[in-house]
Image (spheres, grey):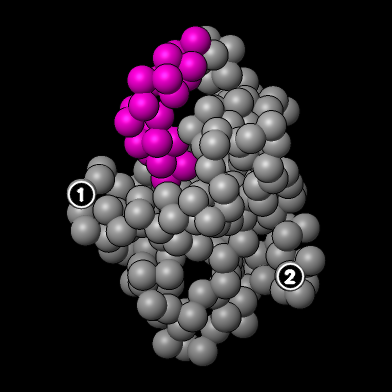
Amino acid sequence: MLAVFDLDGTLLDSDSTALWLWERVRRSWTRTAAALLVAPVAVPMVLIPRTRRAGASILLWIATAGLSEAALRAACAAFADRVQAGALPLRWRELGLAALDAHLEAGDRVVIVTAAPAMLAQALVTPLGRPIVVLGTSLKRQAGGWVADVHCRNQRKCQALAEAGHGARWAYAYTDSLDDLPLLRGADRPVIVKGGPAAQRRLTRAGLPHGLAAIW
């Protein structure tokens, strides 16, 4: 069976991409100034689904301008090392990892599919030492920096799973957001990891009365 997990807010307790971008930007006065200049435009764009890719790309470009692919990978690895060492305010959710490990122990295949850059997500997941496939947003080089290419969110997560050979249905899906509704609808056992009656009602209204609202 296939178990599909979101990353940020599901297995991790906050937004890994936002923290990584901030860590990159704050170390340079030039990048900080540029980010502050565009923030009134870029940040609202990130909050709106149809402009999220463009807004994120603006901030991503500022954070990565001048980096080669090798340097970008090294930056992701260094960030992941700091997370693993507990030096940053980003933690793995214990109950999330327990659920993931339970699937692995049962012989299930596990895939993490995330809107975070695939390169960053892979760097974060690799130190866990578990046989997990990671799918995420692809990046491309543009004007000396890096921007989002194919943004892996909403329906695109399902497309990424299909393109990677995982089909159009899966046994389990875990996420913290109804932005992943297509992912939840593709699962026999959808789980939203925000527990309580309100979360359960949201699943029912979304057409998933068999869904589970778990508390992680």
**Residue 94, placed above or below residue 55:** below
Above or below 54: residue 187: below
- Residue 29 in the magenta stretch? The answer is yes
N-terminal of the pair, mark 1 or mark 2, is: 1
Left or right, residue 85 beside residue 93: left
Residue linked to disc 1: 87
Which numbered dot is residue 164?
A: 2
Name the residue: 79% across, 66% down. 163
90 to 85, vertically: above or below: above
Left or right: where 163 falls relative to 122: right
> Over which residues does the magenta segment extend?
16-37
- Assess disc 1: are there few (<14), some (14-19) or many (≥20) residues with their C-alpha within 10 Å of its C-alpha: few
Q: Position of residue 183 (x, y in %)?
A: 66, 56
How many callouts does the rendering have? Answer: 2
Left or right: residue 54 versus residue 109 is right
Q: Residues within 10 Å of mark 2 (few under 14, many from 20)?
A: few
Against 206, is 1 above or below?
Answer: below
The location of residue 86, given as percent across then percent down, is 20, 54
Considering the image in quadrants, where does the N terminus appear?
bottom right
Query: Circle 2 — which element?
Result: loop
The C terminus sits in image quarter: bottom left
Asked if the residues shown at circle 1 and circle 2 are in contact, with their CB atoms under 8 angstroms apart, the answer is no
Residue at 36% x, 72% y: name it. Answer: 128
Q: Looking at the image, which residue is at 53% across and 28% down?
A: 62
Q: Give the left or right position of residue 149, taking residue 123 as reference.
A: right
Q: Nearer the viewer, residue 183 or 115?
A: 115
| Residue type beneath disc 2 | Ala
Residue 119: image quadrant is bottom right
- Labels 1, 2: front one: 1
